[in-house]
Image (tube, helix red, strand yellow):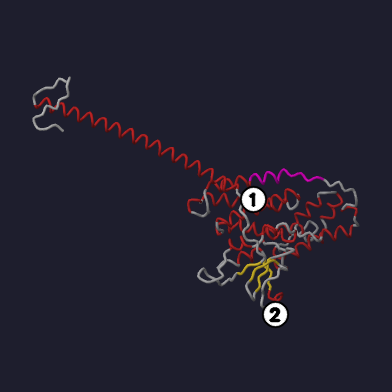
Amino acid sequence: MPFLGQDWRSPGQNWVKTADGWTRFLEERHSGYVSDLNSYCKKEDYNKENLFNSMNYDVAAKKRKKDLLNNKTKIQYFHQEKWIYVHKGSTKERHGYCTLGEAFNRLDFSNAILDSRRFNYVVRLLELIAKSQLTSLSGIAQKNFMNILEKVVQKVLEDQQNIRLIRELLQTLYTSLCTLVQRVGKSVLVGNINMWVHRMETILHWQQQLNSIQITRPAFKGMTFTDLPLCLQLNIMQRLTDGRDLVSLGQVAPELQVLSEDRLLWKKLCQYHFTDRQIRKRIILSEKGLLDWKKMYFKLIRCYPRKEQYGDTLQLCRHCHILSWKGTDHPCTANNPESCSTSLSPQDFINLFRF
């Protein structure tokens, strides 16, 4: 800043000596500074906006990559316990509180599916959870659910057994997820929407794999089912608990078709699954005036739940409130622990955690 009275004009410039001339020059110079400053600020804002957009893009890309990585990562089964303590009257404030997700994580379901006696039990439990209890599981329990389901599908693809059972399970799960994903804004699912969409795509892929299975005829040329005496064939067919299996067996050979239409088979099947009162409400007569047990069976299964039977089940000790697989020893203080154990169906297992 020049001193008072000092000529502060730069050499080589034509200055007007009047005060008005210097004033106009200062105004022009000030306006030039302002315009330069405005252009610089706009440029800075533009650069910041581009930087912000690029950062958002990078974050979104990293998030999508992380979601896919989480989907492909297999969750380790940290707990593979043979029994757990659970108390139906517990609350979150009391010791011993156990949720359905915690029980599903801690009990060894991943190895249970490898046991033929427990396979149908676990599959039925997965189906019930997929139908109505999926949202009650924690995030880890939901991942554990999908990992166990993947092991089930891989086992069926390798063994080529229980194909229809797993198809129904996958269809139930996919239908439930379609409904839940539409309500994702209400926080009914744990996790990112991309993760659930990826899981639904995985389920569709599993369904395609199951539909493409072609069962190969074994190379064994010994005695077959049709080589057995008729009394043994009927005795074996009476052990089937699903009418659809009986129909499928009748499609194998013409002689088996005749046996699969036996009225006594369908009568025993109806009496096994349903009570006399339920049967009397759904009576169907044939053209000859006789009871059509086959039609009655398929009508009854649409109206009432069928009886469930499993080779091995989970049991609850009424004395010490310990949940374990049947035949598993647990630290019970009762004099006769076996008399205190109650077998639980898959639905009873779920009801156990409805506090």
In x, y percent, where is residue 352? 60, 67
The residue carrying mark 1 is 171
Asked if residue 225 lies left or right of residue 182, the reply is right
- Residue type highlighted by circle 2: Asn
Location of the C terminus by quadrant is bottom right
In x, y percent, where is residue 128? 63, 59
Mark 1–mark 2 CB contact (< 8 Å): no
Question: Is 88 located above or below residue 47 in the figure?
Answer: below
The residue carrying mark 2 is 335
Q: Residue placed at 56% from the left, 70% from the top?
A: 96
In x, y percent, where is residue 125? 65, 60
The number of callouts visible is 2
Q: Please state the extent of the stretch shown in magenta in the rendering.
A: 204-216
Q: Is residue 206 on the magenta stretch?
A: yes
Q: Indicate the quadrant where residue 302 lies.
A: bottom right
In x, y percent, where is residue 140? 57, 56
Towards the viewer: 73 or 156? 73
Helix, strand or loop: magenta stretch: helix
- Residue type highlighted by circle 1: Gln
Q: What element carries label 1?
A: helix
